Image (cartoon, grey):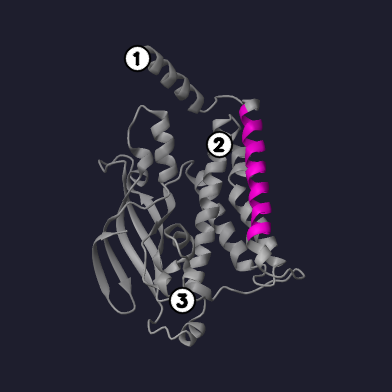
Amino acid sequence: MLPVASFSQSKLNAFLTPSDTLNKPRRNAVVITEAAIGGLTLVGLHQLWYADFEQSKFHTTNDNNQWLQMDKLGHAFTSYQLGKHGAQLLHWSGVNKKHQLIYGATLGFSFLSAVEVLDGFSSEWGFSWGDILANGAGTGLYIGQELLWKEQRIALKYSFHQTKYAKQRPDKLGETFLEQTLKDYNGQTYWLSANIHSFFKESSVPKWLNVAVGYGADGMLTGLEGVDSQLINTNRRYRQYYLSLDVNLKAIKTNSKLLRSVFDVFNMIKIPFPTLEFNKNKAVFHLFYI
């Protein structure tokens, strides 16, 4: 059994190893898979999400003052992560760096912009230029670092903890835990996590150690504060700023390419650490902030 397992591990490592030259079967598989998943997702959104609301003529909306801009951070985060993985898949296929950035790193911006167009035809929502700008910011963060440093020294990450607000408005903030991770902006925190060693390569700082600054918000039942007061929300909304440490999972040494791939996916999550929070009311020390 041991030789068989070793052979299987060897084949898996070979499969996960990026190609040195253009591997057309890999590239074609990546393009077809992404197109199929993206297309099916858009069709699913149209049938399941937008079907509950009346269709309208294409229109725009200005929602930049809602949710204390937490929704915009969500757009930037999603665009960054999709673009990162889009570029990495093309790298795995042996596509040159220029095309990785043009066709891979823009995956998040392209997909989210298509969703925004669907919003534009929904009477409930509307096409938001603020969302488009946030999508571009996430994509720009990835591409900019690749052009400047040829690596990602600063990652856009996410963390979540459950709050009391979802129980007050489960229809808006989510009923299940999974729904709340997407809808309850009170529990979301978005982080810029910088790898210290990448800026000081001759230092003895551990390669896995990051310093992170985060942004969150609290006290929100709806997008606008005026609507909150109509719902008898006694909690005043406010912004939260965080300073913490983090772990760069990609810097953890392992000979397993499968484990490296797993680390790369989960590296979008900010690892809990002692954290300082600053808000308009006070400064708070969290021994273990999620």
Q: Give the alpha-carbon distance from disc 3 to disc 2, as whole Å.
A: 39 Å
Residue 110 in the image: x percent, y percent?
Answer: 65, 52
Please, what is the three-letter code of the amino acid marked with disc 2? Leu
Q: Earlier in the sequence, mark 1 or mark 3?
A: 1
Q: Give the alpha-carbon distance from disc 2 to disc 1, as whole Å.
A: 31 Å
Query: Residue 181 is drawn in which quadrant?
Result: bottom left
Residue 78 in the image: x percent, y percent?
Answer: 52, 54
Relative placement, left or right, of 34 versus 15 is: right
Q: Earlier in the sequence, mark 3 or mark 2?
A: 2
**Residue at far right of view:** 57
User: Does the magenta stretch mainly form a helix, a strand or a loop?
Assistant: helix
Q: Which residue is mark 2?
A: 89
**Which span is picked out in magenta?**
26-48
Q: Which residue is mark 1?
A: 2
Which of the two residues, 244 or 234, is positioned nearer the viewer here? 234
Magenta stretch contains residue 34: yes
Q: Give the alpha-carbon distance from disc 1 to disc 3, as whole Å.
A: 56 Å
Magenta stretch contains residue 123: no
Rendered view: 261 above or below 267: above
Mark 3 against mark 2, which lies toward the viewer?
3
Q: Dot 2 surroundings within 10 Å: few (below 14), some, or many (20 or more)?
A: many
Please, what is the three-letter code of the amino acid marked with disc 3? Leu
Residue at x-position 27% and y-position 61% = 275
Please, what is the three-letter code of the amino acid marked with disc 1? Leu
Q: Which residue is mark 3?
A: 221
